Amino acid sequence: MASAAQGKDLAVKLAPKVRTAELPSKAHSEEGAVRFEIANLDFFYGPKQAVFGLNLKIPRNKVTALIGPSGCGKSTFLRTLNRMNETIRNTKVGGQILLDGQDILQIDVVKLRRRVGMVFQRPNPFPKSIYDNVAYGLRINGYQGRLDELVEHSLRRAALWDEVKDYLQKSAFALSGGQQQRLCIARALAVDPEVLLLDEPCSALDPVTTAKIEELMFQLKDSCTMAIVTHNMQQAARASDFTAFMLDGKLIEHSETPKLFTTPKDARTEAYITGRFG
Amino acid sequence: MSDIRLLWRKFLNVVMLTLTGVAAFAVVSVLFLILGYLIWNGGKSLNWDFFTQLPKPVGETGGGMANAIVGSLKLLALAALIGLPVGLMSGVYLAEFGGSTFSFVTRYTTDLLNGVPSIVMGIFAYSLLVLPVKHFSALAGGTALGVMVIPITVRATEEFLRAVPGNMREGAMALGASKWRTIATVILPAASGGIITGMLLSLARVAGETAPLLFTAFSNRYWSPGLNQPIASLPVMIYTYAIAPYDDWHRQAWAAGLVLLALVLIANLGCRLVLNRRGAYRSV
């Protein structure tokens, strides 16, 4: 009896320590883990091929940046990851994309998109209140729990809560562009995705807001894998762990960000990052 | 020489501007003339009896058109019930699922349907719903009006849905919403202001139609319970009363005209008011 109580006490005492000791090691063990594995990906808009035999691994809980000149297929590639391109008529995809080892074509598209959220180039809030925007993904997925809490939590994660907490029932269109984009991030985060795809999320934003969103990405890395398409090479250099350089639908080079920006292997990569074309 | 040319050009400019101004003024004044005339003549004849009493038999003065007012509302409700859902759905189809040959044909047919003379709609409803049962009915009248409501609703719905930015669709789909869910919860609400206005315009248009009702709903000097009997309506009453040889009937025809116009105006304004209140959520 006494020993059982002692054991319980011990467990309570140890529990927090165990948990804190476990977390970093778990994260460490996942450091090399791959979230997305893309093999021989081809993509066609009608007869026109936009992506050619692309192979890439997107590591878990890291930020992978996709850079390259306009029209090189980076957005197209990003949109294949949550099968958004399926909404475009007359497109065809070849090769294989694995999410945690599972072929994404085998995953129900609704479930896939819940796991792989997306933020678009231009803020696209719905014509609803701020609250309803964030709650949208939860509601369509039939979430029955405490919406208020999750809405607040998501807005906090998107670093928007303090600015909007007194105006939750106001129209999302009343927000500024940068706030709208953070609202869209909160909306995507509300369904707790494992991956967040960001398609030039800062191209319509001023530098201050851009810095806020980069800061946000840094914080989200704990819980979320991110892939970001950007035209801004400083942004790729600042905010990403890995960078992939694409040209004419092909992946030219992919490595750790500092490496790619300081010692690029391919001459075309060097030409691009030094601003000689694109 | 060049001075003369310059003067001529200035003169021409003034003349053309004046002409367009005069034309614009003519349009506005015609409208206000009709409105003023209607209010002048109809207003004099409007009284409480007009809204509460049935028409009096020939020879007796007084009475009202209560049955025709209710009849018009009933016919419009029927038309809305029949025409608006079909119009809305096909508008959604054309805007969101279209692009095939079928949608091209649908769009073209809709435009043709819009151009079909209203009396032909009347004949259509007559042969479909009056001849087989051998009596006029509210249902036949409502159907004729309902078919006329469809094309305007279709095109309004399609146009306003198309105006909704595509990235809003992507935003919803990226959260895992199905296409239908996206349309129902994001796209339609975004376009609702325009769509409701379009629906109201189409109802306002058929509210004044007389021809398709003449041999479908016919008319009735008494209350018409249910949907299976001839029913009175304001436009047909105006027609009947205006061509009758009695001064008192002319007086009432004016009043009916004014009431019809007021009904349409009130519906329009009411709808605008409601839309404006929710307007904050709209994008454009």
Image: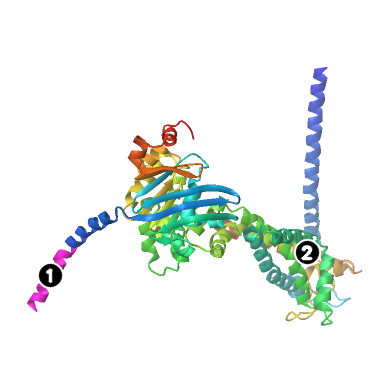
Tell me the amino acid under the disc marked 2: Gly
**Which quadrant holds residue A89?**
bottom right
Foreground of the two, B271 or A220: A220
Give residue A107's position: percent from left, percent from top.
45, 64
Classify mark 2: helix, strand or loop: loop
Residue A9, disc: 1
| Quadrant that contains the N terminus of chain B | top right
Magenta-span inclusion, residue A35: no
Number of numbered tags placed on the structure image: 2
Viewer can see residue B127: yes
Name the outermost residue toward the top. Answer: B1
- Residue at the image position 60 percent from the left and 50 percent from the top: A47
Q: How is the image coloured?
A: rainbow
- Bin the neighbour count of mark 2 within 10 Å (Cα to Cα): few under 14, some 14-19, many 20 and up: some
Which residue in the protein does label 2 denote?
B208
Please indicate whether residue B15 sits to the left or right of residue A244 in the image.
right
Tell me the amino acid under the disc marked 1: Asp
Give residue A238's position: percent from left, percent from top.
35, 40
- Residue at the image position 81 percent from the left and 56 percent from the top: B37
Give residue B209's position: percent from left, percent from top.
79, 65
Foreground of the two, A133 or B228: A133
What is the magenta range? A1-15
Q: Which chain carries label 2?
A: B
Magenta-span inclusion, residue A5: yes
- Above or below B211: residue A77: above
Q: How far apart are marks 2 and 1 (CA)?
A: 84 Å
